[in-house]
Every structure is written in C-alpha cells, then in structure tokens.
Image (cartoon, rainbow, N blue to C red):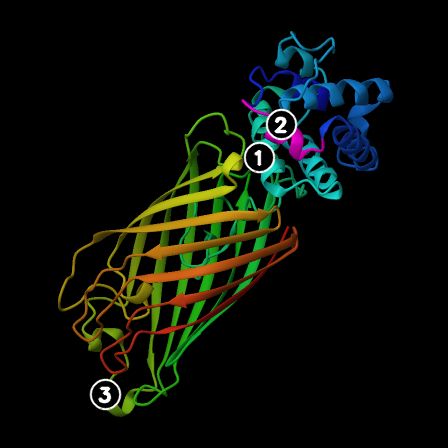
Amino acid sequence: MFAVSALASAQTPYADDEVYRGLGGKQGITRIVDALFEITLADPRIRDTFDGFDIPVVKERLAEQICEFAGGPCKYTGKYKNRDMKTVHEDLKLNNLHFNALAEDLQIALERNHVPSRVSNQLLAKLAPMQRDIVTAGGGAPQAKPDHGKLIATGGVTAVEGSAGGGIVPWALIAGYGTRDSWGASAFATRVATQDYSLVSYGAAIGIGDRVEISLARQDFEGELAPLDQLRIKQDIAGIKLRVVGDAVYEQDHWTPQIAIGLQHKKNKGVGGLGALGVTSVTQLGAKSASGTDFYVSATKILLEQSLLLNATLRSTRANQMGLLGFGGDRQGSRRLMPEFSVGYLLTRKLVLGAEYRRKPHNLGVDNEKAYKDIFLAWLPNRHFSLTAAYADLGTITIFNPKTQRGLYLSAQTGF
C-alpha cells in the first residue's frame, strides 16, 4: 500500500513528458503497474504489507499517480494525496528492507517493460527521498541475521586495499548488503598485471548497521622482468570506516553527499628476492618505515536523474606505492594530502562504467612515483557476486624498470 502514498507525496511533476513517453504512456504505465504487483505480491520481503487492501483499486490509483508524476495527462484521485506521509505509514512499521524491496521490484517491472535505464533512474530519483517518511521502523541495534536489504551496487565493489569503493579509491559506501537494521559482509580477490609486475590482493570486510566497516586485506606484489624478476613484497592492511553523515541513495532531493572517514593501517612484510643485492627491507630502499597509517575522508553521491556516481576522497599518507615500498623516504618524509576521484555511469542497475584517479606522494629517489588511473566496468548480477574489469595505468614503479606500467585489472567479489 505504501507504494501509492509514496508517489502521492511528490508535488512537482517533470517539466516535460520525457519520462511519460519513456514509460510508454498510459498503456505502458498500466503494464508496468501490473508487472510490479505480480512481482511484489510474490516477494516475501514485502508482500505482507499489502494484506487487507483492495489490490485492483490500489493498482488503478498507482497508475494514475505514476502518470501524473511522470508529466502525463492524468490526475491522481487517491485519498492519500493530501495526508502527511508519516501519519499514513506510522502504523505499517516499514523499514529500509521494505522500502528497498519496493524500489527493486519497480526496477524489475520497468526492465521487463523495456523502459530505458535512464528513464527508470529518473523515476526512482523522485521516489528515493520518500524513504525519510515511509520508513518508520528500525534503526535500533543491528539484528543478528543479515537482511540482504540494500539495493544492488550500493555497497560498491572492493578496492585493492580492502575498503568498499572502486578499484583503487575508497568510497563513503559501506561494504555488504545489510541495511541499518542488520549487517553484511564481502570477500574479494583482485589481480593487476602490467608489463613488469603483478599485484594480487585479497581480503574481506564486514559492514555493521550500514554505518561501520571493518576490513582486512593482504597484498602480494611480484616482479616479472629482470632485474626485478625475483622481487616479492607482501603487505597486510587493516581498515576501518565510519559513515558520519548523509545517504548517497535516498537523498536525491539535494546535493549533500554521503561522507565517511576511515583509516588503513599497513604493515610491510619485507622484501624478498633481492637478497643478492643485500636488500631485505623497504628501509634499505630509502623508506623511513616499514609500517604506517593512511587517514582519509570520502564523499560519495549517486545522482539517479543523471545516472551518475561521483566520489572524491582526500587521503593523508606517507605511503610509497600504497605502502608496498614503505612509508616516507629520502626525498620526503612527512604526511601529504593526496586527492582521489571516481566517476561512474549507471548503464543499468547491474552495470557501471567508470574511471578513477589517485594521486600519490613521490617520497623515494628510487621510485619516480606517478598517479594511478583506471577505466573500469563493474558487473553486479546479484547481491552475492560481482566482477570488475579495468584497464589500469599505475605509472612508473622504481627506476630499475622505468617505463609506465599499464595492464589489466580483474576483481571478483562475493557478499551478502
């Protein structure tokens, strides 16, 4: 029932009928509503919320409202139009799982009716802010059982250092698919292969109440071309992230991003394969320390009407090549603020095309460190699996193999 009153609360229709036409006019909207209720009444997450309601009448009113809402020649006649949203929903005790289930079922109904993803996102952008009034339950201590309640892709993928986000940049999103009433987790494995080196990274993260994220990761870095073909470096990373304000998905009616703060403590496990040169530690390459901590703040915004995801991260760091070559160096030893950016275009609700940029300090004389860059395509077929492929540019890595390192990035993630 809350689907009707959610849409009914919108006061500003679209300036033109682009969305109305994209939905297929009145006939298309009727088909979409029929599909929505076929899906919703079979969805165990939400079907009970419609108990006791006259479904044919609800469908008729919802079709009217979507038509008016999308800029079509319709007038909503439902009795809930002028009622306060919280009053309408306070007795239904709906939580984020219910709200997201409706949004996802609507997305599926739109897909089944061949509505373009851009039009679907524009419609959802108007629905999303209603979460503040529709969700009147939950928000207490997270329950013991995971609810798998967040929308697909809203936990991001996993960066090579273990935090939820893109491939090389952490975002303000929290790992896993648990809502604020639950928890979720993810595990990942990533391989980046360039002309002279390979990096394998793997680990896991847990998100609690869609508020706190704890992650652990291991990185294995290897040289594959002389004179560093025997090079082996390992690094352990422990991370924590706290969402402090905003919501990247629900707050579509203003520009405030979701903001999170985080840290990543990194411990280099030593240098292997260079014993003949007398090098067994990154400090012998000029680093000041073999361990260190990065601090960062990330701001993430999903602009559904534009089908865009935007992220900016500012990192305080002394890390050389993420810490693989230690922390600080003979050129520069103090912390520096390094910017990082991500942009993604939502091709569909399960496919994201994007690019990332990560600036890094140049601390070591033996490492002419450059920025990381990538172009990625993330495929998220369901909540339990995702695959991200990218073309990565890691700049130069040490003066011994001075050419720019470019190659393929492939990451698989499982989660709930």
Give the residues in magenta: 15-24
Looking at the rendered structure, the kind of residue marked 1 is: Arg
Crowd rating for badge 3 (residues with CA inside 10 Å; few <14, some 14–19, many 20+): few
Residue 144 is left or right of residue 370, and the answer is right
Question: Marks 1 and 3: which is nearer the front?
Answer: 1
Task: Looking at the picture, tell me which residue is in the foreground, 16 or 183.
Answer: 16
Name above or below for residue 180 compared with residue 223: above
- Check disc 3 and report its element: helix, strand or loop: loop
Q: Are marks 1 and 3 in contact (CB under 8 Å)?
A: no
Crowd rating for badge 1 (residues with CA inside 10 Å; few <14, some 14–19, many 20+): many
Looking at the rendered structure, the kind of residue marked 2 is: Gly
- Check disc 1 and report its element: helix, strand or loop: loop
Residue tagged by mark 3? 278
- Check disc 2 and report its element: helix, strand or loop: loop
Q: Are marks 1 and 2 in contact (CB under 8 Å)?
A: yes
Give the CA distance from mark 1 to mark 3.
52 Å
| Residue positioned 50% across, 48% down in the render | 345
Residue 354 is left or right of residue 178, and the answer is left
State whether residue 93 appears in this view: no
Instruction: Find residue 7 and report its horizontal and vertical position in percent.
Output: 65, 21
Task: Looking at the picture, tell me which residue is in the foreground, 274 or 151.
Answer: 151
Task: Looking at the picture, tell me which residue is in the foreground, 335 or 361.
Answer: 361
Instruction: Find residue 275 and report its horizontal and vertical position in percent.
Output: 29, 88
Name above or below for residue 208 compared with residue 371: above
Name above or below for residue 100 compared with residue 373: above
Q: Is residue 412 magenta?
A: no
